[in-house]
């Protein structure tokens, strides 16, 4: 089948006083061992500058061992950022921009700037993406937990409940509808957020919902583990949710309400996670998943009968290629497509362990999980890079994949705008004459 494409990763990312332990070499090597042959990473601006952020990530990616693309985060708004977005789309092969409604005081932007960003994305044919949590309310929730003396990892989940994810998801969807632009909601972690996506899609709005592996297969009981190290490794945002949410997200993926599975691979080791001992707000957020995604989705969704093999290819590869306008170069096995191919044995078993994984982190949130369906061969760019449980990778062999604007979700946008204008029945032509009688 086509190699997997992970739409959501953070390699060599500086965040919360630390840098993710996996860089473009180790993270991509892990991905290849798990059957993923391309990923799209998020460029973080440097002091708000998109061009400085892009240059920094070009350097970070020099040791790449597989193909990759870039999304660009937007962490502030002004005319310079607006102009730089044009450069990113027209000259740098970036066709998506991420807006954070969370992380007050760092990445978060307000609704005024979100609207400006949505309008700019629409004009450029770039897909806007949102991290949807109400940052102001999360900040209030964090203060509340600290005041209650709840300082451990469980405070993280308690401070940012599903209702705040649902609110922000619904708000972003409505504002995207107001602007009339497609929208991609990253890491849908709760029933609350999923239902907002479902409602919008049912009404005909162009909204993409991305669950991540951790949200599909884990639950938040681990955050109450008495051992800090064990609990802290599961801290990510939005948080892993209570039992029941994962099953609902699986059902939504099966029904097509959610369309493509990412990982939000953002790894910190035990020492880095320990920065938050005594204050959960300082635990670097993130979990692993690049190596485990294909195996866990097969075992959870295909082996259980929830989706077909064809659906598996769709949610792990093809739809991602279509959303980011690189199909059929990626996401297909066709004449002219890149030779990114995997061989998965449905009868072979896997077991996940931090002792054998290829990530540099010393923990694994899926530790001890076993299942059916193992990637036995990975071919990237026509070369066998994973076979007989051995990697054959060359640093610097990965290629940057430019992604053009105006994917198929933009089809019909102009017509919808025209219909909107004709529906206004305005302006009304009124006489300025005042009748003296």
Image (cartoon, helix red, strand yellow):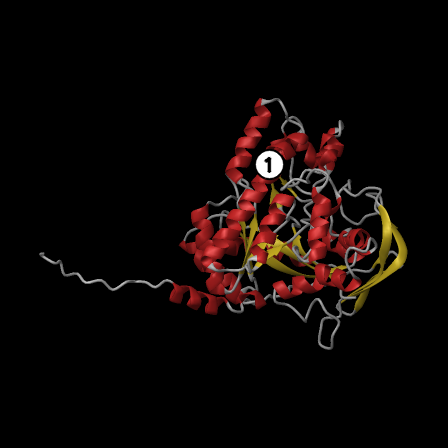
Q: How many marks?
A: 1
Q: Callout 1 environment at 10 Å: few (<14), some (14 to 19), or many (20+)? A: many
Is 362 left, or right, of 193 in this rendering? Answer: right
Q: Residue at x 46, y 64 (%)?
A: 123
Residue 201 position in % (x across, y down): 58, 57
Q: Position of residue 240 (x, y in %)?
A: 68, 40
- Residue beneath the point at 53% across and 66% down: 410
Q: Looking at the image, is 426 positioned above or below residue 279? A: below
Q: Quadrant of residue 366?
A: top right
* Along the line of sight, the residue nearer the viewer: 367 or 78: 367
Given residues 113 and 420, the one toward you in this image is 420
Specify the quadrant that holds the C terminus. Answer: bottom left
| Closer-to-camera residue (105/146) | 146
Residue 224, percent from left and from top: 72, 30
Badge 1 is on which residue? 160
**In which quadrant will I find the N terminus?**
bottom right
Residue 225: which quarter of the image?
top right
Question: Residue placed at 76% from the left, 52% from the top?
Answer: 293
Question: SS for tag 1?
Answer: loop
Residue extending furthest toward the left: 436
Where residue 19 sits: x, y (%)?
64, 43
Residue 86 to residue 12: above or below: below
Left or right of 387, for residue 78:
left
Q: Farthest residue toward the bottom?
A: 335
């Amino acid at each position: 089948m086509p190699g997997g494409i992970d739409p959501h990763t953070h390699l060599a990312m500086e965040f919360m006083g630390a840098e993710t332990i996996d860089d473009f070499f180790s993270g991509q090597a892990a991905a290849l061992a798990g059957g993923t042959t391309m990923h799209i990473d998020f460029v973080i601006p440097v002091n708000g500058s998109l061009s400085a952020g892009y240059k920094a990530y070009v350097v970070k990616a020099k040791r790449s061992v597989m193909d990759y693309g870039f999304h660009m985060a937007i962490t502030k708004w002004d005319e310079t950022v607006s102009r730089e977005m044009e450069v990113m789309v027209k000259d740098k092969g970036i066709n998506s921009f991420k807006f954070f409604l969370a992380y007050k005081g760092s990445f978060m932007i307000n609704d005024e700037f979100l609207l400006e960003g949505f309008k700019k994305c629409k004009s450029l044919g770039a897909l806007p993406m949102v991290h949807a949590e109400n940052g102001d309310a999360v900040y209030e929730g964090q203060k509340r937990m600290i005041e209650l003396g709840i300082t451990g990892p469980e405070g993280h989940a308690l401070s940012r409940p599903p209702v705040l994810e649902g609110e922000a998801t619904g708000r972003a969807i409505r504002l995207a509808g107001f602007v009339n632009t497609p929208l991609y909601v990253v890491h849908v972690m709760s029933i609350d957020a999923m239902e907002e996506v479902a409602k919008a899609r049912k009404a005909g709005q162009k909204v993409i919902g991305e669950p991540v592996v951790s949200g599909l297969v884990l639950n938040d009981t681990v955050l109450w583990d008495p051992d800090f190290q064990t609990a802290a490794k599961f801290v990510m945002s939005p948080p892993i949710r209570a039992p029941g949410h994962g099953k609902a997200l699986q059902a939504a993926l099966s029904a097509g309400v959610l369309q493509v599975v990412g990982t939000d691979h953002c790894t910190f080791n035990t020492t880095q996670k320990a920065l938050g001992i005594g204050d959960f707000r300082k635990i670097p957020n993130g979990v692993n998943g690049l190596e485990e995604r294909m195996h866990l989705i097969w075992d959870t969704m295909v082996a259980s009968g929830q989706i077909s093999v064809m659906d598996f290819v769709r949610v792990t590869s093809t739809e991602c290629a279509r959303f980011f306008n690189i199909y059929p170069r990626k996401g297909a096995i066709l004449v002219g497509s890149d030779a990114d191919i995997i061989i998965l044995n449905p009868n072979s078993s896997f077991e996940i362990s931090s002792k054998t994984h290829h990530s540099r982190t010393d923990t694994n949130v899926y530790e001890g999980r076993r299942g059916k369906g193992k990637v036995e061969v990975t071919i990237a760019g026509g070369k066998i890079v994973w076979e007989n449980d051995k990697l054959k990778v060359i640093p610097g062999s990965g290629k940057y994949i430019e992604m053009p604007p105006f994917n198929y979700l933009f089809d019909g946008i102009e017509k919808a705008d025209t219909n909107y204008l004709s529906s206004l029945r305005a302006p009304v032509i009124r006489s300025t004459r005042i009748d003296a009688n």
